[in-house]
Structure formats: structure tokens, C-alpha cells
Image (tube, helix red, strand yellow):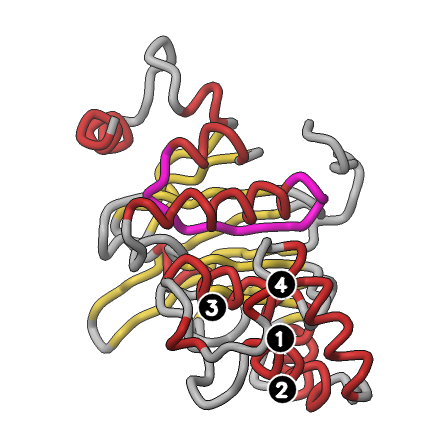
């Protein structure tokens, strides 16, 4: 286990999904998905486009609504109760493919806004925390610029800092590097690696297999709305381990 991670087998899971199902009309996008995530565990979720992996992590903070089964996040069951949804979103940061920064606000204000509005922090505390996070992601000198003045990689690092400003217990990443030019991908992955090593619970939907090999505690393979196979990366990517035929077909295409 990496430095800073103290994941214990006896801990209560921080995320529990039981027989989770979701439909878009007639399309059954998630099929009886059951999964437990331990505190400080890093899960990398892979699979073909349309397999349900992004929908799955979006259900965890209720950006998408599951219609059947159970989701429990940090001891709170996700239901129609607005209070429960708000509690879970407070503890769950999310980073998307697109950066979703406010173009009319400075980088400092983009990061400070949510802690001031949601956690009712005074401006000086929120801005001090924002500067600490900009330093952590390697771009403190960009604080007074606007999103349009930054590269895609820099904007995505701001998006990560903005999610961290709410001091979440869990970070969800939905293909955070897929909209970036190749030379910008490494700078974002390096920030995510540092975050994983610090002990953050992370669920990462990605096509970056090098990241999965290096950082994941567990790799989950989705296909057609189901978890087909899962395991530690040293097993998942090993040519000596027999895989489910669908997993092997996918790995043959991408490795």
C-alpha cells in the first residue's frame, strides 16, 4: 500500500451498492450492480463506451437516479430524501470530463465559492484554502486568472482543487482526462496519483491503463451494465491469469 494509506480490512465500507438497477426508458443501463468500497480505497472502473460505468458513479451522488436496489454512502442511504442527498453531496467531490468552471469568475473565486455558500466559511478562510489547494495541484500563480486563460490541463487541475475545497471524504472522477490533449494528461494524472497516495477514497472512470496499473487498489470491468470482473491490477492485467472472455477481449483491444 502506498504511503499515507491505512486501509484496513475490518473497516466499515464507505460505499455500499446492493442490486442496483437503472433504466433509461426501455434501456436497462445498470443491471444488479453490487459493490462495496472501503475507506481510502482507489477503484478504477474500465469498460467499453455505453457499458454503464459513468452512469454508475453518477448515481453515487444522485446526479443520476437509480430505480431499484440500495446505495449507502458513509452510512447514509441515498433515497428521495433531499436532506440525505445534500449530506451525501457534501461528502462527495466530483470531477467531470468537461471542467465546468464559471468563466466569469477568477480561478480563486471558482474554488472559494462553494465553501462560502455551502459550508458558510468566511471569505478569507475560503480563499486561504483555495490557495493551499492551488499550490497542491501545482498552479498557485494562476489564482487571479480566468478559466479561458488556462490550458485544458490547468483547468482540470482547478476543477480537482474546487472539488477538494469542500473537504469531501470521497472523490468521483468521470473520465477526467478524455477531453485533454495528450501532453496535458500527465499533469492531471500526477495530481490524482498524489491524491490517491494521501489516502482519499477514489472511484475513477478512465481509459488510462497506466494509471490503473500504478494507482488502483482494485480494477472493475463493466460491460452491458454489469460488473463482469474485478481484482487487483497485478492480477487484472496479468497475461498469466485466466479472465472472463469479455474482459480478455477488451484487454486485447486496449493493451
Q: Residue at x 53, y 59 (%)?
A: 172
Distance from the alpha carbon under mark 3 to that under mark 1? 11 Å
Q: Which residues are magenta?
A: 197-209
Going from the N terminus, do you reach mark 1 or mark 2 first?
2
In the displayed structure image, the side of residue 158 where residue 15 appears, left or right: right
* Of the two numbered discs 3 and 1 in the rendering, the one whose residue sits closer to the viewer: 1
Mark 1 surroundings within 10 Å by alpha-carbon count, few (fewer than 14), some (14 through 19), many (20 or more): some
Q: Residue at x 33, y 13 (%)?
A: 239
At mark 4, the secondary structure is helix
Q: Residue at x 20, y 73 (%)?
A: 26
Residue indicated by mark 2: 81
> Which of 136 and 84 lies nearest the eye of the viewer?
136
Going from the N terminus, do you reach mark 3 or mark 4 first?
3
Going from the N terminus, do you reach mark 2 or mark 3 first?
3
Residue indicated by mark 4: 140
Distance from the alpha carbon under mark 1 to that under mark 2? 13 Å
Mark 4 surroundings within 10 Å by alpha-carbon count, few (fewer than 14), some (14 through 19), many (20 or more): some
Q: Are marks 4 and 1 in contact (CB under 8 Å)?
A: no
Q: Are marks 3 and 4 in contact (CB under 8 Å)?
A: no
Residue indicated by mark 1: 89
Distance from the alpha carbon under mark 4 to that under mark 1? 26 Å
Q: Is residue 205 magenta?
A: yes
Q: Are marks 1 and 2 in contact (CB under 8 Å)?
A: no
In the displayed structure image, the side of residue 34 where residue 73 appears, left or right: right
> Which of 66 and 103 lies nearest the eye of the viewer?
103
Going from the N terminus, do you reach mark 3 or mark 1 first?
3
Residue indicated by mark 3: 59
Q: Where in the figure is residue 99, as x and y percent of width and height?
A: 41, 70
Q: Residue at x 29, y 46 (%)?
A: 182
At mark 2, the secondary structure is loop
Q: Is residue 142 magenta?
A: no
Amino acid at each position: 500500500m502506498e504511503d499515507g494509506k491505512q486501509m484496513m480490512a475490518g473497516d466499515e465500507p464507505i460505499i455500499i451498492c446492493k442490486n442496483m438497477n437503472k433504466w433509461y426508458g426501455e434501456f436497462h443501463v445498470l443491471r444488479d450492480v453490487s459493490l462495496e468500497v472501503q475507506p481510502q480505497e482507489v477503484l478504477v472502473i474500465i469498460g467499453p463506451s455505453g457499458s454503464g460505468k459513468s452512469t454508475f458513479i453518477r448515481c453515487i451522488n444522485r446526479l443520476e437516479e437509480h430505480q431499484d436496489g440500495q446505495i449507502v454512502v458513509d452510512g447514509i442511504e441515498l433515497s428521495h430524501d433531499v436532506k440525505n442527498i445534500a449530506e451525501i453531496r457534501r461528502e462527495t467531490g466530483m470531477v467531470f470530463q468537461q471542467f465546468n468552471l464559471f468563466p466569469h469568475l477568477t480561478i480563486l473565486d471558482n474554488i472559494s465559492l462553494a465553501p462560502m455558500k455551502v459550508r458558510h466559511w468566511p471569505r478569507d478562510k475560503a480563499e486561504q484554502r483555495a490557495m493551499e489547494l492551488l499550490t497542491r495541484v501545482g498552479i498557485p500563480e494562476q489564482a487571479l486568472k480566468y478559466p479561458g486563460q488556462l490550458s485544458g490541463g490547468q483547468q482540470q487541475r482547478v476543477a480537482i482543487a474546487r472539488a477538494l475545497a469542500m473537504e469531501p471524504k470521497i472523490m468521483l472522477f468521470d473520465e477526467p482526462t478524455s477531453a485533454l490533449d495528450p501532453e496535458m494528461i500527465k499533469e492531471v494524472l500526477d495530481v490524482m496519483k498524489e491524491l490517491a497516495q494521501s489516502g482519499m477514497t477514489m472511484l475513477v472512470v478512465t481509459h488510462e491503463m497506466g494509471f490503473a496499473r500504478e494507482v488502483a487498489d482494485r480494477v472493475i470491468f463493466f460491460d452491458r451494465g454489469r460488473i463482469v470482473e474485478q481484482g487487483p491490477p497485478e492480477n487484472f492485467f496479468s497475461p498469466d491469469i485466466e479472465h472472463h472472455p469479455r474482459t480478455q477481449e477488451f484487454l486485447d483491444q486496449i493493451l
